[in-house]
Image (cartoon, rainbow, N blue to C red):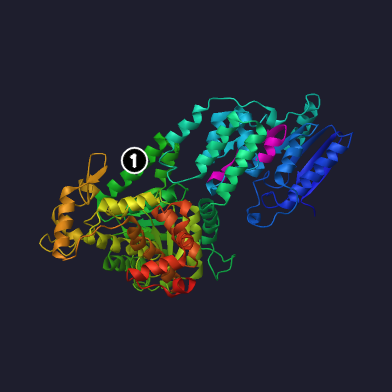
Amino acid sequence: MSSVSTQVIDDILVVLVNNPPVNALSWHVRQGIQDGMEKGLADPSIKAIVLRCEGSTFIAGADITEFGKPAQGPDFNAVLNMIEMAAKPVVGAIHGTALGGGLETAMVCHYRIAVPSAKLGVPEVKLGLLPGAGGTQRLPRIVGIEAAATMCSLGEPVAATKALAMGLVDRLAGEATLAEDAIIYARELIAVGPRATRDLPVQGDVDAIENLKTVNARKWKGFDAPYANLACVEAATRLPFEDGLKFERTEFLKLMGGSQSAAQRHMFFAERQAAKIDGLPKDLPLRPVNAVGVIGAGTMGGGISMNFLAKGIPVTIVEMVQENLDRGVAVIRKNYEASAAKGRFTTEQVEGMMALLTPSLRLDALADCDLVIEAVYENMDVKKEVFGKLDKICKSGAILASNTSYLNVDEIAAATRRPQDVVGMHFFSPANVMKLLEVVRGDKTAPDVLATAMATGKKIGKVAVVAGVCDGFIGNRMLSKRQQPAMQLLLEGATPAQIDKVHTDFGMPMGPFQMSDLAGLDIGWHRDPARIESIRDGLCAAGRFGQKNGKGFYDYDEKRVGTPSAEALAIIEEFRATSNLPKRDISDQEIVERTLYPMVNEGYHILEEGKAQRASDIDVVWIYGYGWPIYRGGPMFWGDLEGAGKIVEALERHGVPVAASLKAKA
């Protein structure tokens, strides 16, 4: 069956694309569109042409699987030029999504008709690219400078109703009558004639481009693609169309050949790959999750509950003390109301979600839950006690999950008579915002329990990754390999501000010491001010607990903005002096080698031990759980860019034992 067919309806030719699942612009689709257009233009009885798609969507974009392979079929730009310069009116009929190359195809059609539910956009910026087939030059000619610059640099699609107001769509069709409405529209346009997009004037104020840069400065820090997109839209305001295309092409090739787009494309596939569980059949029946229990109404338990309530799944939340329960429920309501104030929810939706929440002081209220998530204090004895009780209370077949961030899930499971039903579900704080979910597979976790936990993560909008049982799983295990040498570097002469700046310049949202202050330096502290065995002990003994009380490694103002602290530096200096370590100047490069390279090394250890399924899963954990910059593609991808040889040489020079597989790669 051909991926493009044609049908003649009186004096209208319909060119119909059918390339499931999303009608991507594969080489044979480009060939088919070109052949169909040639047929329509050569036949004097054809007066207008409609380009439409079968299936669930219009052309959803380029065929990503063709990236980096030898070119086949007609050049995309040549096909677009042919449509745009056609001597008969061409109507693009849009349903589903017209994204990227799909929208570029729609924009060379002289007129566009869409169903109200359609979405149109140029999301290339999210892959570190720009719409490279004239998108940045045609869009400003259709919708004006500001709308084009916004769409190209942010990559968010617009609904067809908004596209109509912007002029991106000329007419709305009936939701079920696109085929008929497009032909009626095409027939009306025979008298009007073609309208080449390239001939339209660029309208609007070029200052809108600078304004976008100002508003998004923080969000775009370190990224190349948003600025390249804006440079191309700006070029459309001052260059003739053909010169603008050349400018766009140059910028596109720079991005396409750069490491940022390679990293962002790697993450696009890595995220999809992470959802797959090696060795399990795709059609494995899942356990039902229609009612969820959460133990603990603190920050973590409340955040976890919000994920389920927002998806219409009832939650029973349990606390031991009424005051803590009331506070937890009030925080959930406050968070939802804050979102409603920003327009994310209606008041009715907030009340609907709160109505699904059942607060309780009794564990046996969880008897009928399909999934129970424990989010209590990070202490093995406490967790084992909770699971021992759940074992007696919960119905047969219920999944018992621990939100532990470090502890041994097998040891927790051993506190029950049903270790096959126990799994780790490590949410990241704040749990209602952070997208990562580490699903920890115990030695005895049943395959359907693992698969259900992964599917549940997806259902509540998380990016779920399978991890094995080890101290800290994937993310925190690697984090410790950054935090330990960072502390050691303080003893050798670096300052918290210098080390943190190396990390924020790298693209991390915060450095090791800013992160420690945010988490709280007193978490896990032994509480004896006379016992000072580390810099952290010294800071806690001086009452410096981090952001929570306005002083940790840094001093904080009322807006929690940190500045270097003379007192903290004196405590570090005092501890360094007792350690008899000579103070020296430490370069930024050494900080990278001693804090970031060991993380890559630990990733190789994790893979060798089978605690992660694949290197790209480790990248997903760090992008979604710890704010690793997506334009660097995660620690494992970045490690490949740095080069195994360079990393091994530095690790050996600093006395770090190197993973065998990393050494072999070098």
**538 relative position to 635: left or right:** left
Give x and y (percent) for residue 257. 57, 52
Q: Position of residue 416 (x, y in %)?
A: 36, 72
Q: Residue at x 74, y 35 (%)?
A: 84
Span shown in magenta: 104-125
The relative height of residue 552 versus residue 660 in the rendered view (above or below) is above
Specify whether residue 657 is painted magenta: no
Q: Is residue 575 above or below residue 303?
A: below
Quarter of the image with the N terminus in it = bottom right
Any part of residue 116 in sight: no
Q: Which residue is mark 1?
A: 334
Examine the structure image and report whether residue 121 is included in the region drawn in magenta: yes
Residue drawn where x is 55% and y is 57% of the image: 269
Q: Is residue 92 left or right of residue 580?
A: right
Q: Above or below — where is 640 with respect to 158?
A: below
Determine whether 181 is above or below 381 in the image. above
Residue 530, picture quadrant: bottom left
Residue at image point 89% right, 34% down: 44
Give the quarter of the image for residue 68.
Answer: bottom right
